[in-house]
Amino acid sequence: MGKIDEKIRGRLEVEVCGAYVEGLLNAAAMSAIALWNVRSVDACTVRLCMYETDYPALSALGEKCMCELKPIRLSGGSRDRKLLKRRRWLAVFLLLMGVLLFASSLFIWEIDVVGNEQLTDGQVLRALSRCGVDSGTCRYSVSADLVRSQMLRELPELAWMTVNISGSRAVAVVLERQEKPEIYAESAPADVVAARTGIVRRLSVENGRPVAQRGQSVLAGEILVSAEMDSLSNGSKYVRAKASVLADTWRELSAVCPAQEEVKEPNRLSRSRFAVIFGKRRINLYFDSGKAIDECDKIIHEYKLGAEGLFALPVTFVREELRGYDSQLKPAYDRQALERELTAYLLADVKGQVLEKSFTAAGGESLYVLTLRCHCLEDIARVTPST
Amino acid sequence: MKSKKELPLELAERLALPEEALLGAAKLTVTGGRQLLVENHRGVMDYGQERIVVSLGRGKLNISGTALVIQAMNRRELLISGRIQSVEWE
């Protein structure tokens, strides 16, 4: 049996005594009186549960079947109603809360944005506010179609959007416009140029006319293989050059960081203060609005009233936690970590192998500079459309 | 020649219809030896913690076990729970 049903209609536990108790059970079943948890106590006695409202009918049947009924325990039903009658103010309060809950469910109190990658939540929320969807807006006054057309005008980055409202929560689902990709012509004439400055060690040409030679030093951007080729019939023809050019290159990477930094050491000073936000109005439950501690971190905890995903109320409790700290100057760099970072950066950029590398450190009072110098053997060929 | 009483049975068999729907025959569903549902019963004849006798119109059902409890009962269905040891159809 449903617990809520039992609470409203009242669950009555009854003891039935009689020579033929089974007759009463059968009569009750025929009269559509719901009975459950029928337990035999002895040969002439059973205990059963029933709805309080069915008791008069079962009592009448008991007389017919010569059984004696004795109520033992009542939960819910008239008992709870009597309790509420006695506590009139509690009943009024519960009623008022119910009305408030119903009234607040007619308005939007929480807006979430999903699907945005380039646009920030704030940009979408501000545009929604301009289109009439804001905290405190009546949910029935929002037309998804109207909001969509206004939003697409407000934010040109949007391709599509909609607003789903459930209870007091609105979810703005946005789809951003995709940038048109650059169209790449596979057969267009193109040269192979040097991506980096270096000395050519090996040149393997698949298509095009080689311009650079083995052992020649080239600058970044210099043409290595030309798209222009001699043609027997027409003077010259243009092709898409393709080549692999291995070259010795030298690189220098530097990491610069402050020599010292301020590090926070938490101290024992801490304080909490509270505030309540009704809709958009904030009421501070403290008097001094400034920082209570000179150097401190402020951590804000917000507790929204309502059930997550079901409904939201326009009341938010705020707890601000102020945690004090002392500042101390400490070395800001870790040479080994910087070396690892520079090496990882180098390996991600080199299209070949690193033959040799060395680190040098320099710096003054304020800055620390770590420099990585290396000799690499890599493919420097880069295809660019010929001009 | 079939008797008059057997005609509905014959009809249900020929039409492949469930007997409990056509004739109101009793149907038992036992779940793991802990729960027994009797549909189309005609009332409880005897009730105790170790034995329950249910009338089925055309016979009776003896249910033996321990800690037997009538979980729910209405005009058509009877739900019995407890440790069911045997079910006899008379």
Image (tube, coloured by chain):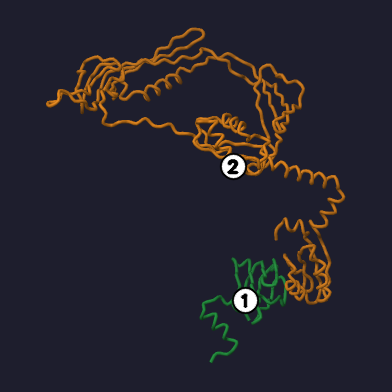
Q: Position of residue A135 (x, y in %)?
A: 66, 35
SS at mark 1 in the image: loop
Which circle, 2 or 1, is nearer the viewer? 2
Quarter occupied by the N terminus of chain A: bottom right
Residue at point 70%, 23% (across, down): A270
Q: Residues within 10 Å of mark 1 (few under 14, many from 20)?
A: many
Residue A99, quarter of picture: top right
Q: What secondary structure is found at the residue carrying circle 2?
A: strand
Subunit ID for the residue under disc 2: A
Q: Amino acid at mark 2?
A: Asn
Q: Residue furthest bottom?
A: B1
The residue closer to the viewer here, A107 or A382, is A107
Figure check: A351 above or below B80: above
Q: Position of residue A126 (x, y in %)?
A: 60, 30
* Nearer-the-camera pick, A380 or A137: A137
Q: Is A378 placed left or right of A318 in the picture?
A: left
- Residue B32 x/y as whole percent: 59, 66
Q: Chain of mark 1?
A: B
Residue placed most toward the observer, A135 or A266 = A135
Q: Which residue is mark 1?
A: B26
Q: Is residue A246 above or below residue A98?
A: above
Q: Are marks 2 and 1 in contact (CB under 8 Å)?
A: no
Q: Is residue A242 visible?
A: no
Judging by colour alone, the chain drawn in orange in this rendered image is: A
Residue A5's place in the image compared with B44, above or below, is: above
Per the image, the residue denoted by label 2 is A164
Per the model, the C-alpha gap separating discs 2 and 1 is 52 Å
Q: Colour of chain B?
A: green
